[in-house]
Image (cartoon, rainbow, N blue to C red):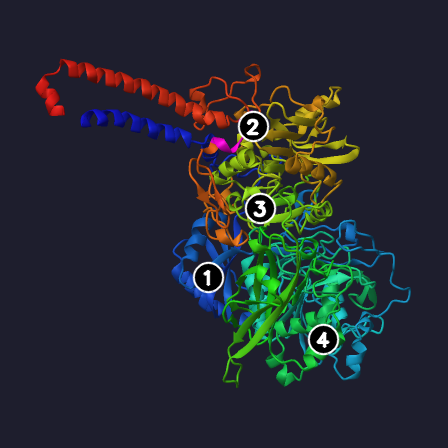
Amino acid sequence: MGTLRRSIFSPWFLILVIAACFYHFHPSTDYARSQKPTLTPSKNISNSTGNGKRQPQIARQNYIVRFLEYKTAEVHRTYLQSSIRSEGWEWIERQNPAARYPTDFGLISIEDLVKEGLTEEIRKLGMVKDVNVDMSYRRGLLKDDRDRAGAFVDGKKRPGKIFTAMSFSEGQGGHSSKISNASVNWGRQLLMQRSQVTSMFGAQDLWAKGYTGAKVKMAIFDTGIRVNHPHFRNIKERTNWTNEDTLNDNLGHGTFVAGVIAGVDAECLGFAPDTEIYAFRVFTDAQVSYTSWFLDAFNYAIATNMDVLNLSIGGPDYLDLPFVEKVWEITANNIIMVSAIGNDGPLYGTLNNPADQSDVIGVGGIDYSDHIASFSSRGMSTWELPHGYGRVKPDIVAYGRDIMGSKISTGCKSLSGTSVASPVVAGVVCLLVSVIPELDRKAILNPASMKQALVEGAAKLAGPNMYEQGAGRVDLLESYEILKNYQPRASIFPSVLDYNDCPYSWPFCRQPLYAGAMPVIFNATILNGMGVVGYVDGPPIWHPSEEEGNLLSIHFTYSEVIWPWTGYLALHMQIKEEGVLFSGEIEGNVTLRVSSPPAPGEKNPRISTCVLQLKLKVVPTPPRSKRILWDQFHSIKYPPGYIPRDSLDVRNDILDWHGDHLHTNFHIMFNNLRDAGYYIETLGSPLTCFDARQYGTLLLVDLEDEYFAEEIAKLRDDVIYTGLGLAVFAEWYNVDTMVKMRFFDDNTRSWWTPVTGGANIPALNDLLASFGIAFGDKILNGDFSLLGEQSRYASGTDIVRFPMGGYVHGFPFLDSSESGATRNVLLTSGMNKEDSPILGFTMMGEGRIAVYGDSNCLDSSHMVTNCFWLLRKILDFTSEDIRDPVLFSDSVKLDSALYEDDNQLPSRRTDVNFSTYSAVVGKELICKTDAKFEIWGTKGFSLQVRGRNRRLPGYPVIDLGRGFNSLIDTSKIPWRPKATQRRMIDSPGNYFSLFYGNEPDVPLLARSYWLAPALVAASGILLCCWRIRQRRRRRRKGSGSGRLANL
């Protein structure tokens, strides 16, 4: 019997193993794996421009070699010459005033043919910190706010580093903004008899006390200044850092800035007339500058002990490390830097570097009516995305419209811009520095203490939020009172988060806290006036004022080391599960202890306790249907990648650099959804890091990244079995168009190629493949009317796959892609346009899906018409199954599925290294600090395990004992009749093709899970029966002794 039992058990065991393997096999997951991008260089387009012309190779390019120590340029040159074995490079002598001081970098020229190998060889040298291209800046002096030009004009890149429009414009009448959070009205103009900006701040009161900026060294980094200008009494030094042989200002930019700071003309007085002016000419007459010029000039400012530095330039590239880190070094050497926040308002997420750095005083602009200027850039900072949350910037605002300043030679003129507001604050700072006795200045004044005095003394404006105005309008006299009695200390900015203070505390005051939500992150700045280096002594502590405060759980991430002068404190706030029904307010304080080494002459460390006051609103957890989850994780922005703008009609701003966050360029959509009663949460981690049972809809808008295979599998299960709604707003994607958008960057001597299209359609198609949905590669433009709303479809894509029974809307648009050009020519000859499907609705198991091919109508950056009405209709369907009769008319219902062959779907680019920019390709799947506390550092909520009971962190046991099929009603799953089936191309992931000649366009759902194992099991049973019968026959023929032995 033992042998017989073993013989029967073995095949059954084998069958069970095989069946289990089939049972757990997911075609969608393996399909995703098989579709991973192959990132290989392409040789056929490396030397061609967008119009197909061949361009000559530029032989050499300049590189900045940064060293670990300051030494003379000669020592660095000798070191490189003795250490580098390769040929093809030359040392560049820099003849400027900094040449007599030690330096931490060298400038070399490298031949293009050897640049990769040579730069890698230099990077490996022991005394070398890094090697970077010598980037350049370019800035335009504008005549009108509405005619701004940045790095791109008519879709073509201008010479120089990518920058934004930072200069000011001629003072003219204002205009209203339709997309600012504040209610802006520019009706009030400056009076005919222009007021002095200095009198608006009460500068004359400090002049009367004898404070005029005397013995304050003011560095003005700009276009220079002319010698013996009659408006200045104390020009100490003029230096030229450019490749032009002149010290004069031939543009008027630097002269105007200097006039606002220290002018003495009665018509255009400056704030600090006795300030010592040091004019650093870092821009040419063509408004071009290089990073190496700035580095030398910065080093010279450090060596000559400047007190204050004004920089009215900037751009979106906060990853230009040589520049950014040199700014840190400037402030670490106790130089107070003031910089304009940018002229890219009223758009959000448009902060310019270096003003967006926490150690720099970033200045926004207002008019004389205390309205935020339409041109002033808005926060938040975008460095921290996607996992974190941005900081509050600007720090303060100042008058920046119709300001009087000095002309190039003589006389005054009126200009506007944040480049005007910046020298206003720089002048205020010079005046405040002169208040402190010269011998005590370095002991008391530093970038942190000055910022403390400015933000604590600022007047908060009624109307604008914190990301528009920072602390508010600078108040010279209040800041004077603070500095007069200042004692070194640390503080937090903002020092209060009050949910009752709306609109200042937007967006926090717009949506209360509730149990079960993703953590709400508030990112504050630590200002350490005690020293350039500080330390956080132990974790921050939450002190609730009342018992209800214990319902709030706060996790902290923060700078353990504070340098230079500043750090960050991020609060990750959740309401505990026991507060699911709580409604009310929670108040309390967060305290943080900071210490710094003792100052000269002191024995003990300096210690200070910072306080952040919280006043929070809490409501009962909203119903699932009202909760929306926004996917931030799969968004990629510039920098670091060349991510093109979503609307190709925008020719002068082709980079997608505004953050694509709910609270930056999608802030109007956020407000609209809140007005409609929805609660919107943000997910900055993979799709495995949320519990789908808590949300009505997952909202995917304008996403550029890839997806982990685990994300694809989980989303499929979330929709079909958990009833999660899915709303997708895609964008254009066309490889030929992307190739045409390439440009040769004269700074980096390399081709810049779009990493992806407006959205990553191949990745989205992988994500939606399980649902039988895919987008195409058309670029559609046109106007259409739906539900009585007139809308603009701006560079959107088309739907090329959709399951039978779905509802699809199409409109006759022109295809502006390269491949669509021929079709458009035929259309102009009299052919009718065919409808392109752009909007689709379908049921999928327990869930509902809606897809739309354009996101520009939700994005405030370059919105022509909004489609918030459509978004609400989509959410009605995906979250609550409310169907608009027009959108779900029988006339748009599909009798047969839309289908396009795999080889006709958009393909990934193979000539870009996508892993450089992706948070997915080549990375580990992990839930970060924006996810719920209980899954930090894990892979998230596991895929549903069939046939087992499991417990999700913080949730009751889920009974899966009857298997996966028991979770859904299979009668609700749409099936396509055989008559409408199409032949699909078999792929390694399509294991069902072993059993079906024709695959359905929708996935084989619950019934298909038992079909393949059942066939294998049936075959196994027949095999077992046959083997048993054969053994019995053999036993009848055998001897009795043999049978006895077997027994």
Q: Magenta residues, as a range?
A: 965-973
Tell me the SS state at disc 2. Answer: loop
> Which callout, 2 or 1, points to the residue nearer the camera?
2
Label located before the other in sequence (3 or 1): 1
Residue 1019 lies, with reference to residue 348, above or below; the image says above
* Mark drawn on residue 772: 2
Residue 63 or residue 841, whichever sits in front? 841
Which secondary structure dominates the residues rendered in magenta? Answer: helix
Q: Nearer the viewer, mark 3 or mark 1?
A: 3
| Residue located at (50% from left, 64% from top) | 105
Q: CA distance from mark 4 to mark 2?
A: 63 Å
Q: Which mark is residue 479?
A: 4
Q: Are marks 2 and 1 in contact (CB under 8 Å)?
A: no
The local secondary structure at tag 1 comes to: strand
Identify the image quadrant of residue 504. bottom right
Q: For this rendering, which residue is in front, 614 or 124?
A: 614
Name the element at disc 3. Answer: loop
Q: Earlier in the sequence, mark 1 or mark 4?
A: 1
Q: Earlier in the sequence, mark 2 or mark 3?
A: 3
Q: CA distance from mark 1 to mark 4?
A: 40 Å
Left or right, 696 with respect to 110, comes to: right
Q: Residues within 10 Å of mark 4 (few under 14, many from 20)?
A: many
- Residue 554 colored in magenta in the image: no
Which quadrant: the C terminus? top left
Give amino acid for label 2: Gly
Residue 636, labelled with which disc?
3
Q: Determine which of the numbered discs, if any, sits on residue 174 in the image.
A: none
Q: Please tell me the numbered disc located at residue 129.
A: 1
